[in-house]
Image: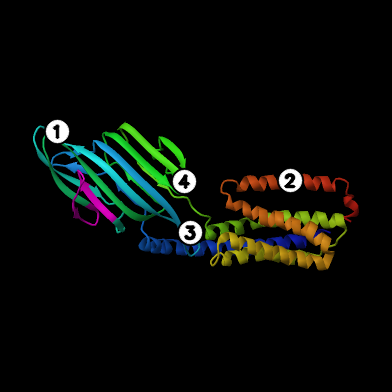
Amino acid sequence: MFRHIAAIAAIFAGTCVGWLILGSTVQARTEESTGRMRDKVVGLWGGPHAQYAPVATDGERISQPHTSDVNVVLHLEYRRKGLLWYSTYTSDFQAAYDFRNEEDGARAMVFTWPFPASGAIYDGLQFTVDGNPITPQLTKDSASLKVNLASKQSTRLEVRYRSQGLESWRYRFGEQISSLPNFHMRIKTDFKDVDFEDNSLSPTSRTASGDGWQLDWTYQNLFAGREIALIMPQRAQPGPLASQISFFAPVSLLFYFFVMLMLSSMRGIKLHPAHYFFLACSFFAFHLLMSYLADHVDIYVAFAISSAVSVFLAVTYLRLIAGTKFAVRDAGLAQFVYLVLFSFAFFFQGFTGLAVTLGAIVTLFVTMQLTARVQWNESLFE
């Protein structure tokens, strides 16, 4: 019996080496293409946006807006390149800023509007001053316009545009902010999974709006060295997910071999180490097929097809050895739990460890209950 267990252990070890090679290969392919593919997405769609608040200067002093009313609508759209999904979006930006000449005399003020991303495309870009359209001087990084203001006079600058970005959208108040009075920003999204970068400003209110959120930041006198930063939700990434599941596969196979050893002993079915070899191959087929099928179809579709193929291989094989009942009820169910369900837990980030732990505890409980009255000296260790 010792030689029997040793042979199964050797098969297990060999399969683990195969998974290590497969997982490393998928990981290397993903890392190799990440930078290149991301550059292509940025070139076709646009990069992350970081919109700075405008400033006004008379050559000596820099003035912040006296009132800021900013409205942004973000539409999320996933795009795939290679083994990775990218979170792209369109942003509809509209803002109104009130500036005031606090000096006693008249002065010419130059308003500077930084663009949120270098090389981005802006559709419907429009500037108005007190309701009158105006054509600013444009550079690749900013737009500027000059307005003459009488003493204590206020003026309203309005800006609107539609653009495209990637991964994150930010609003920055400036490199050095002393105070920003009467600030309000409203961002509407068409997605629920909203996240904010660490050390950024959280919204002062949040309201459900259709498929997304209405987020508001309202301050009467804002002192902030931080920014408003939204991180777009990510889809399950085929490349990293496939490699993670491959690296975890030995745990699934260990549970499966253990259960199969117990069940075959209880049922009086003698499985040769060669049988375990082909069962390990059916497990490996799942990861191999999913890793390369994910290049061409959605990761969920690839997962479903690979699961079906793997379970089909094992069940049809064991049906010829131990009968349909054992193949479907025992082996098929065990493979579904320890291969399919354990692997699917990786789609739920943060819950994988808990799912595996609960599966291990349930396995232990069921095994203990089923084998409590087994005479091991007459079965497994005879």
> What residue is pinned by disc 1?
152
- Secondary structure beneath dot 2 equals helix
**289 relative position to 161: left or right:** right
The kind of residue on which mark 4 rests is Gly
Residue at 80% x, 57% y is 329
**253 or 40: which is nearer to us?**
40
At which x and y percent is residue 292?
Answer: 57, 67
**3 relative position to 64: left or right:** right
- The quarter of the rendered structure image containing the C terminus is bottom right
- Would you say residue 213 sits in the magenta stretch? no
At which x and y percent is residue 156?
Answer: 21, 41
Q: Which residues are magenta?
A: 124-142
> What residue is pinned by disc 2?
362
- The quarter of the rendered structure image containing the N terminus is bottom right
- Would you say residue 134 sits in the magenta stretch? yes
Q: CA distance from mark 4 to mark 3?
A: 20 Å
Closer to the chain start, of discs 3 and 2, is: 3
Circle nearer the viewer, 1 or 2: 1
* 206 to 7, vertically: above or below: above
Q: Which mark is residue 85?
A: 3
Residue at 33% x, 54% y is 162
Closer to the chain start, of discs 2 and 4, is: 4
Q: CA distance from mark 3 to mark 2?
A: 35 Å
